[in-house]
Image (tube, rainbow, N blue to C red):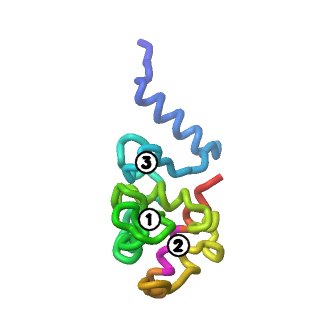
Amino acid sequence: MTLRPSFAGLAILALLAALVAGCVGTLTPVDDDDTGGGGDDDTGGGSVARQMFDDDVAPLLQATCASCHAGTGGVVAPKFLGTTGITGYYANVVGQTALVGAFNPAAATLLTKGAHSSARAWTTTESDTITMWLLAEADERP
């Protein structure tokens, strides 16, 4: 009698072999459809940084920045939040090099601009949240 491994069993063995060998790639968030998700399924793309943005940073931007910097109704440039609402912020925000400072918190105007016009400065907790997200993005990018 000959034992034949199942396809699923082979796939699991291949995955384990790749992990043991250290063959893991870099996570790069992808948001081609501007719907707030990674790829076509809008699940967040599996990126830790992207999940941090969706859960923690986007709500801050919605509450603090959208009234002036959204593409719909926003009156102040840059309109870095786009036109698709909170679910579309990610692609717009990461696409603004000066805003995210190449994911270096010290260079990100999102953090360094501070209070301006009618906007208030970030609280320490909010600033820390954005900083942690920027560092996670930097860590995940090639």
Query: Which residue lies at the image location 43% right of the left edge and 48% below the top edge?
Result: 38
Q: Please state the total of marks drawn on the protein image.
A: 3
Taking the image as shown, residue 136 lies to the left or right of residue 38, namely right
Asked whether 52 or 95 is in front, the reply is 95
**Which residues, given as a range, are shown in magenta?**
127-133
Task: Report the Cα–Cα distance between label 3 and label 2.
Answer: 20 Å
Q: Earlier in the sequence, mark 3 or mark 2?
A: 3
- Image location (x, y in percent) of residue 11: 47, 31
Q: Kindly identify which numbered label has been placed on residue 38.
A: 3
Could you tell me which residue is drawn at 40 percent across and 24 percent down?
Answer: 6
Label 2 neighbour load within 10 Å: few <14, some 14-19, many 20+: some
**Magenta residues, dominant SS class:** helix
Foreground residue, 13 or 107?
A: 107
Q: To which residue does mark 2 refer? A: 132
Instruction: Work out which residue is located at the far front of the displayed protein and give it.
Output: 75
Give the class, few, some or many, for how many residues have Cα within 10 Å of label 1's Cα (few <14, many ≥20): some
Marker disc for residue 139:
none
CB-based contact (under 8 Å), mark 1 and mark 2:
yes
For label 1, the residue is 52
Relative to 107, is 15 above or below?
above
Label 3: how many residues lie within 10 Å, few (<14), some (14-19) or many (20+)? Answer: many
- Tell me which amino acid carries mark 3: Gly
Residue closest to the eye, 70 or 25: 70
Whichever of labels 1 and 3 marks the residue nearer the N terminus, that label is 3
